[in-house]
Image (cartoon, rainbow, N blue to C red):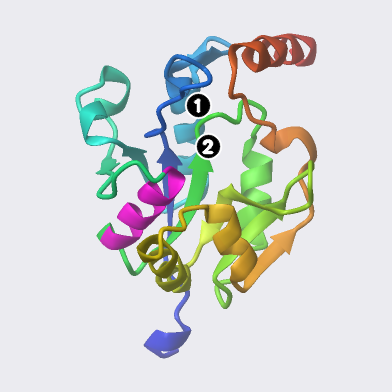
Amino acid sequence: MNGQSKVPPLYGLLLTGGASRRMQQDKAALAYRGEPQLLRAWRLLQAVTERAFVSARDTQRDDPLRAGLPLILDRYEAIGPAAGILSAQDEYPEAAWLVLACDLPLLDTATLQLLVTRRDPAVAATAFASSHDGLPEPLCAIWEPASHGLLRQRYESGSYCPRKALMQSSARLLPTPGAALDNVNTPEEREAMQHRLETLA
């Protein structure tokens, strides 16, 4: 097997650098079933990747919840999730990245394992289709090294939306995993999610 046909290693990246403006508090620190969502999502990533990292802003490096975990700090200013993805790709350009948002309380190992099993290293990314609109879900997706050029090009042109980058790329789109990717952005959505989790317990 030559170097060109070798499958890139799969690393995990948990995105926690958002400002959480709609939630009005750090979404990664919110507890579901008695545990901060950051730690729960971190364990899920560790279970399916070779190495896992937490993406954060420089001002979060000393936060007690994050400080004990391997961090990749954003090198790009205030451009949303693309800052974390690009920073990770800059740090380890040889790796593919399973990128995960920190606000998915229903996500489970089986869903991530399905994503990893169905991964296609020959395309720019592998992603699930959204249950809401059928478009690619960029924040529970595997971004191959080949996606870096497009993300960087879009960044330099002022376009920061990872979903639109997936739509422009040669992404493999998997069927939606149902409610597993339902996210939580507001206090009202958090309360509703807590009720859902109680009924599932």
Which residue is identified by label 1? Answer: 40
Q: How many marks?
A: 2
User: Residue 44, which numbered label?
Assistant: 2
Position of the N terminus by quadrant: bottom left
Residue 98 in picture, x, y percent from top left: 50, 52
Position of the C terminus by quadrant: top right
Residue 62 in picture, x, y percent from top left: 20, 24
Q: Are marks 1 and 2 in contact (CB under 8 Å)?
A: yes
Residue 16, quarter of the rendered image: top left
Q: Amino acid at mark 1?
A: Arg
Q: Residue at x 44, y 65 (%)?
A: 154
Q: Amino acid at mark 2?
A: Leu
Q: Nearer the viewer, residue 152 or 112?
A: 152
Highlighted range, magenta: 80-90
Residue 91, quarter of the rendered image: bottom left
Q: Residue at x 29, y 49 (%)?
A: 76
Dot 1: what SS? helix
The answer to whether residue 120 is above or below residue 193 is: below
Q: Main secondary structure of the magenta part?
A: helix
Q: Is residue 88 left or right of residue 115?
A: left
Residue 20 in picture, x, y percent from top left: 46, 24
Mark 1 surroundings: few (<14), some (14-19) or many (≥20) residues within 10 A: some
